[in-house]
Image (cartoon, grey):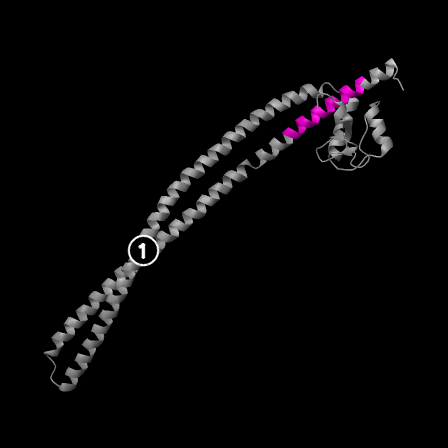
Amino acid sequence: MRLSESDKKMSTSIKESLSTLAALQRIDGERASIDESLSGVEASINALSEQLGTFEAQVNEGMGNLDALKKRYRQDESDLKSIESAIVKGEGKLHAVKTNKEYQSTLKEIEEFKQKASATEDQMLTVLDNIEEAEKQVAILKDDLIDMQGEIEEQQATIRKQAEEHRGKLEELNRKRDSVWGQLDAKMQKTYERARHQGNGVAVTAIVDGVCQVCRMNLPPQAYIELMRMNNVQMCPACQRLMYPQAMIDDI
């Protein structure tokens, strides 16, 4: 069946409207994607800061353990001096005792102090080994922290730079949207906004081989035939989005 001139004009008008609607949807899709990216900028930057903070806490914990070991060594060192002083005092006491019982008691006391001194010295050697190992670990952690700080600062700078680029792109898209939006009459604008609200931000869907590219449902045969005729703007019977036949819209 051949189309009349009025039908051809209507078809052309509908085709232009569908092309405009599809272009508008593409713009809104890009805007939504950029908005989503921008909404996560601060979270991404904060996550990196938290990551750095967690590692800084590990470094501080390592330094705290090292300080505790050094404090323990100083305490052992002080205890050893006290024990050695007690040994010297005991040995001097031996010359002053008057009975064999006192002599044996003092000898036993000196021996106990010597055993305690030996145990303290062994403990100090162990603590020294632990201090040496802890110092190595802290040194490694500090170097890693410096590297991590540089990497995270670089990553955060990259995120901020990309965010600025996205904001610039968003401004450009907003200007472009205003221009495309102005090509629709008030009725079509209202229809688009209603479909966009119902479709969770997606107002327009392409139809390829009779299949809605958003909800993936097959159009009923008659609905597909009417769509291909492009006599009017139609909505997908399944997802209620405005439809256009992708193959017939040249600039899609």
Is residue 27 within the magenta segment?
Answer: yes
Report x, y in % for residue 65: 35, 56
Q: What's drawn in magenta, residue-wise?
A: 12-30
Q: Residue at x 83, y 30 (%)?
A: 224
Q: Residue furthest bottom?
A: 100
Report x, y in % for residue 19: 74, 22
Disc 1 target residue: 133
172 or 108, which lies in front? 172
Amino acid found under the numbered disc labelled 1? Glu
Work out whether residue 35 can be spotted: yes
- Relative placement, left or right, of 45 versus 17 is left
In the picture, residue 248 is in which quadrant? top right
**Is 242 placed above or below 75 here?**
above
Q: Residue furthest left?
A: 95
Q: Residue at x 76, y 19 (%)?
A: 16
Report x, y in % for residue 73: 27, 60
